Image (spheres, rainbow, N blue to C red):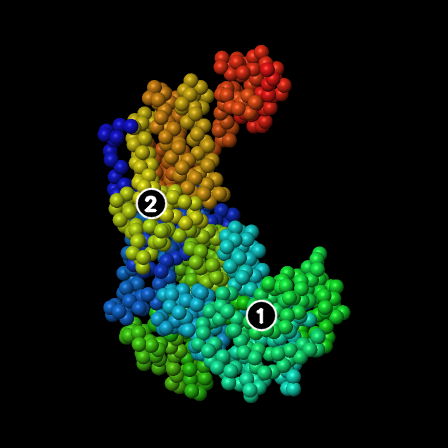
Amino acid sequence: MSEKQNPAYDFQGIETKWQKRWADEKAFAAPEIPDRSKKYYVLEMFPYPSGNLHMGHVRNYAIGDLIARFKRLQGYQVLHPMGWDALGLPAENAAIKDGIHPTIRTEQNIANVKRQFIRLGVSYDWDREIGTYQPEYYRWNQWFFLKMYEKGLIYRRENEVNWCPSCMTVLANEQVEDGLCWRCESVVQRKKMPEWAFKITAYAQQLLDGIKELEEGGWPERVTTMQRNWIGKSVGMECDFPVDGSSEKIRVFTTRADTIHGATYVVIAPEHPIVAKITTPAQKAAVEAFADKMKKTDKIARTSDTTPKEGVFTGALALNPFTKEKIPVWVANFVLADYGTGAVMSVPAHDHRDFAFAKQYSLPIRVVIAPKDGAAPVVAEMKEATVEDGVLVDSKEFSGLESSAAREKISEMAERGGFGAKAVKWHLRDWGFSRQRYWGTPIPVVYCDKDGMQLVPEKDLPVVLPPDVKLTGDGGPPLAKVPSFVNTTCPTCGGPARREVETMDTFVDSTWYFARFLDPKNLQMPFRRDVADAWLPVDIYIGGPEHAVLHLMYFRFWTMVMKELGLVAHGEPVKRLLTQGIVYKDGNKMSKSKGNVVSPDDMVQKYGADTARVFSLFAAPPEKDLEWDDKSVEGSYRFLRDVWHLVHDVLPMVQGAKPLEPSELDALPASKAAWRKVHATVKRVTEAIGTDFHYNVGVSSMMELKNTLRDIPAAEKETVAGRSAMRFALEKLLQVLNPYAPHIAAELWEKIGFPTSIDKAGWPAYDPAAMISETTEVVVQIMGKTRGAVVVPTGADQAKVEAAVRADAKLKTYVEGKTVTRVIFPKPGKLINFVVKD
Ligand code: ANZ
């Protein structure tokens, strides 16, 4: 390559030139209403504008942009929007620290992040930009609040909430990870407080059923599994255990009604209201002390598998309604007050926790389930519970039944006897969404001494956040300290009233933003139905896997509600989800707190946006984690620089070359091989992006093609047909490179002088027939040992290959004068094996 004569690869100049042109031409504007059969909605999770993107973000957006550009080139009408998930704690905390108002900081950050997006050449339709901190956006959160309140999907409750002492606000269950705050990792406390909640549990079954559709659409299994577990449907029975000598009954929930004859004691949550009523005076002090201790123990720690099982006897006995035995009632750490009925019938022989507890406190163990094809375990020899289904033993008239049939029969009997019923329990809890912070959507409610709680009428929306607020971080909702906000009039009586001072969880903002992009300036409605019908659902959604049961559950719920409100036709927001892996550097997740962030600005400055994009897509398949590696960055850069020089080396030769006639290549073997490789490369890149989601394979196949083209001898390149072949090859190479590295592709395309712009050139087709080589190399083995190879016409039969072997000066010595007893020639004809006798 004669790099010296070529102009340098001035990525800075090229990239800013094309970015300006795309902006001036609004090159990526989506139509308002697309042809539905040709629509494609690509969405990346919108960022919290924290100031700067890092390479983890770049990966996310490079993937989205690759898909958006690819689909556009394939002739789809693509919607690819971007906005800002801008409300939330970081801006508020920063304001407490340095006094800069969240609006000012947010807008500065947005400006910077937007500049970074533009500098990366991401093909967004910027006319659709939205920011959740704008009243034009959050007024619709308030509108949804009114609609959902009317539908009975919002209520106020006194609840034991998750409280983050550092963020000084309530957290939803989904925002607590292993007992820690999802945002700041402080240990979460439990606190009784009134709060607003969404009745997401009313959609538990729908959320569960919808998972089938997600699986068909290609959601990652780890996400659907986490969703299924989080919703956590349990089918079982509730059953009363009357307390001996009292009118009280303990109602238990069990998924294993078949084991009820083995229930040898009952355990209840220490917080259960019945505890005080049934505990005997002798046990009172011990039980209360235990309950006190549990109050201070974190719920996760209490129930973790590794935590020792602990409990105290209440002194009470309860009647097992099936065995009619009196069995002791205990309180224990592992029984939760807010699941099932808060009480459990303990079957130590068939449940691990109960077994451990029974061993600890020497409670009786009774086997009632035998394996289907074996003997029942002997209690004295048991090292652990046998938890599998089987056949009932020692269970009166139910003995001999299989577990599943027994569950039916036993719950029917409890139902008939009036002391139990089949029951379904869910792990999913309602979503508590009121927060004691400022930088969120005000809840559209006022309180009047006369009329009580009143909704703000629709015509008075939005309730706007007051700008003049002092953020001090000394606890309590900041809005309560702004009299001009708090004091208002009652919409019913016109008398004085006070506004709600709590704000909405910022996860509300991201429940429906994907639909606002369709109609971002609408002042009458969140969005129009016709545009929703035209664009939804989102075809592919790209983001981090950490939202598996947070955002991804909430926006499914919200979409189901929007369907019932008649706003959308689909109950699921997103067809396909792609969760990209994490970017690591030096073994740690790339993050500000680890101080190992690589800034896209530095990357773009040093290597260019195209290199940053190619590196992000090349270093690993999208769902796998990616280790930052300077060498691989260099490699991506060199690839683009080589393409630059490859094109410049042949520029005058290809500029005026005439269209290729493949038959003319017969005399030019290297060009002919390259022509075949072009077709193979187009096929591989098309599949890498379109069907396989292995974007890295696309890059490596383009790298191979670049090398093949480079190595065509000058004598071939300079012929008329050779020039046509080169032009053809570069045309296709640039077309498939375009979604990966759009700036350099556009520039080189223009230089070669193709008539239309590369973004209008479509996606190249490939000819499978062209990929078949005329000759094939067949490996020759004698008695299974490789001795050489012969080159034969592709598709040659066994006789022809044998003849070629016998004609080969070296190989013929292995078969001549010997008895060939068998020749093995398996498909697809790449290997022949001779079995010979001397
Ligand atoms: C008796 C039994 C016998 C049980 C057996 C299991 C195995 P999932 O699937 O999570 O719904 N349980 C019920 N309520 C509980 C609570 N508040 N805190 C702790 N554990 C509770 O689990 C249901 C099972 O978990 C129930 O079935 C109950 O124990 C226990 F061989 O009842 B089982």
Element on which disc 2 rests: loop
Image quadrant where one finds the N terminus: top left
Residue at the image position 51 percent from the left and 82 percent from the top: 286
**2 and 182: which one is in front?**
182
The residue where tag 2 is placed is 629
Residue at the image position 52 percent from the left and 73 percent from the top: 310
Element on which disc 1 rests: helix
- The yes-or-no answer for disc 1 within 8 Å of ligand 1 is no
**414 and 680: which one is in front?**
414
Q: Which of the 4 image quarters holds residue 373?
A: bottom right
Residue at the image position 53 percent from the left and 51 percent from the top: 217
The reply to whether discs 2 and 1 touch (Cβ–Cβ < 8 Å) is no
Q: Is residue 808 left or right of residue 607?
A: right
Image coordinates of residue 721 in percent, x first then y, are 39, 21
**Amino acid under label 2?**
Asp
Residue positioned most to the left: 4
Image coordinates of residue 402 in percent, x first then y, are 71, 62
The residue where tag 1 is placed is 359
Residue 61, compared with residue 402, is above or below; it is above
Q: Is residue 217 left or right of residue 241?
A: left
Image coordinates of residue 647 in percent, x first then y, are 32, 31
Q: Is residue 615 visible to us here?
A: yes
Q: Nearer the viewer, mark 2 or mark 1?
A: 1
**Amino acid under label 1?**
Lys
Marks 2 and 1, how far apart in space?
54 Å
Residue 827, compared with residue 545, is above or below; it is above
